[in-house]
Image (tube, rainbow, N blue to C red):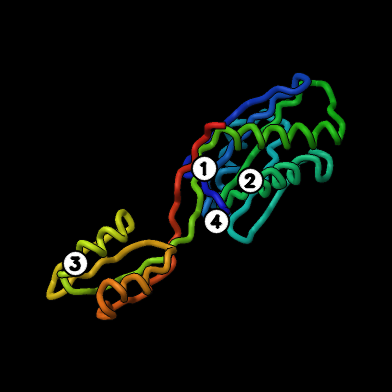
Amino acid sequence: MQYKIHSKFETTIEIKKSKFISYLIPVSDEKTAKDEINYLKKIHPNANHHCYAMIINDIQRSNDDGEPNSSAGIPILKELQFSNITNVLCVVVRYFGGIKLGVGGLIRAYSQSCKAVLEICDKYALIKIKKHQITFDYKYIDKIEFLLKNDIVDKVFDEKVTFTYLSNNDYLETFNEITSGTINYQFIAENILEVKQSNEK
């Protein structure tokens, strides 16, 4: 299952006197991501590195920004991949504290920094759900309302009743049993619902 975020999140950790400030930002395209990176460079002009990774649909990018090759951007990207988040940018701003961490230490530090901000973010699960429409005689309304319960998203009362509902369940056979085969059924589309996930562990 994939996830999205709707707002920005920020955390700071310190490792051997170096400060790592992580930003998790929702983005819809690469231009927006680049604008966000440039903005963070402006508000952190004295930082030593502004490393980042992004996942935008099928696009995946990472950048070490002067850190040793694959020691920063790739660890950030791997954390994003592991979390199944899409349309997201993570920038980790580093203020060097005077103690070198080595390549292995940097990989752990950038991974840990990204993980820290992922742990506090509000995630929304992207759930695929089918949208349907049915039209039927008024005499069946109570039984069909009881069957669909909270799945109904729209009701139209005309010569007949038309319900629009969201569900991945196949009710067609039951509809035909209830209405003796007189129901008019139409599949409309597959929608994506975004359902907020709890941060409780």
Q: Quadrant of the C terminus?
A: top right
Q: CA distance from mark 3 to mark 2?
A: 41 Å
For the residue marked with disc 3, what is the amino acid? Answer: Val
In the depicted view, which residue is nearer to us: 191 or 57? 191
Residue 150 x %, y %: 31, 54
Question: Height in image: 165 above or below 187?
Answer: above
Structural crowding at the residue carrying mark 3, measured as other residues with C-alpha within 10 Å and reported as few (<14), some (14–19) or many (≥20): few
Question: Height in image: 165 above or below 79?
Answer: below
Which one is earlier in the sequence, the residue at label 1 or at label 2?
Answer: 2
For the residue marked with disc 4, what is the amino acid? Answer: Asp
For the residue marked with disc 1, what is the amino acid? Answer: Lys
Helix, strand or loop status at disc 1: strand
Q: Identify the mark at residue 156; answer none if there is no mark.
A: 3
Q: Which residue is mark 1?
A: 123
Q: Give the label, 2 or 4, closer to the camera.
A: 2
Structural crowding at the residue carrying mark 1, measured as other residues with C-alpha within 10 Å and reported as few (<14), some (14–19) or many (≥20): many
Q: CA distance from mark 4 to mark 3?
A: 38 Å
Residue in the image at 59% along x and 55% along y: 56
Which one is earlier in the sequence, the residue at label 4 or at label 3?
Answer: 4
Q: Which residue is mark 4?
A: 29
Q: Quadrant of residue 151?
A: bottom left
Residue 163 x %, y %: 25, 66
